[in-house]
């Protein structure tokens, strides 16, 4: 799986983690894991142990848009009203073009860090219940091991119970 190790998005993610002194365990999976359930199945963990990277469109009162990244426990459905209240933005679903153009990642490989346009970040506090969680590393075949505390540190994210 050397080709996924050399993928530019994976290199970008690992470079940002290295800047924070993090050299994570990285796993290269034989199949794409575009959902928390698929990632959990591939890793032998529960969906709740997956830090699911969800990009939303945040819209200001002046109709400007920006990416909002919610790192949600794969066992949770995100309450967008809760995210809207925490960010002061109207929150909507992002399409694949918005995700790719703003983050530099495709859906299924959106990582917590390494975005082309730095998003506002929300980190689901439910992730703190686990000693380790897994997050996408910039490619749908590559994940890395991390913790909720580490995600808060590297993203500067806001801790929030996103399940509402």
Image (tube, grey):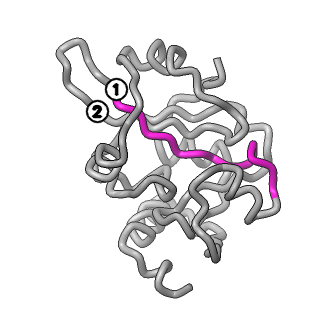
Q: Residue at x 80, y 49 (%)?
A: 46
Mark 2 Cα shell of 10 Å, populated few (<14), some (14-19), many (≥20)? many
Q: Which residue is mark 2?
A: 66
Is 55 or 34 nearer to us in this picture?
34
Horizontal side of 135 relative to 128 (left or right) equals left
Q: Secondary structure at mark 1?
A: strand
Label 2 SS: strand
Q: Is residue 97 left or right of residue 138?
A: left
Magenta segment boundaries in residue numbering: 45-57
**Residue 84 in the image, given as x and y percentages of width and height:** 44, 17
Q: Are marks 1 and 2 in contact (CB under 8 Å)?
A: yes
Q: Residue at x 66, y 70 (%)?
A: 25
Residue 108 placed where, x, y %? Answer: 51, 56
Residue 47 part of the magenta segment = yes
Residue 96 % position (x, y)? 36, 47
Label 1 belongs to which residue? 58
Q: Disc 1 or 2, which lies upstream in sequence? A: 1
Quarter of the figure with the C terminus = top right
- Give the side of residue 124 with respect to residue 4, left or right: right
Main SS of the magenta part reads strand
Residue at 73% x, 65% y: name it. Answer: 42
């Amino acid at each position: 799986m050397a080709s996924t190790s050399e993928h530019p998005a994976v290199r970008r993610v690992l470079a940002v983690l290295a800047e924070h002194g993090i050299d994570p365990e990285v796993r290269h999976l034989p199949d794409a894991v575009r959902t928390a359930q698929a990632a959990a199945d591939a890793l032998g963990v529960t969906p709740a142990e997956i830090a699911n990277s969800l990009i939303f469109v945040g819209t200001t009162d002046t109709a400007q848009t920006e990416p909002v990244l919610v790192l949600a426990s794969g066992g949770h459905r995100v309450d967008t009203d809760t995210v809207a209240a925490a960010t002061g933005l109207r929150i909507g679903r992002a399409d694949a073009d918005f995700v790719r153009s703003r983050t530099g990642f495709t859906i299924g490989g959106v990582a917590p860090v390494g975005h082309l346009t730095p998003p506002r970040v929300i980190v689901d506090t439910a992730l703190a219940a686990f000693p380790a969680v897994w997050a996408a590393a910039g490619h749908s075949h590559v994940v890395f091991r991390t913790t909720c505390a580490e995600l808060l540190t590297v993203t500067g994210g806001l801790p929030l119970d996103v399940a509402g």
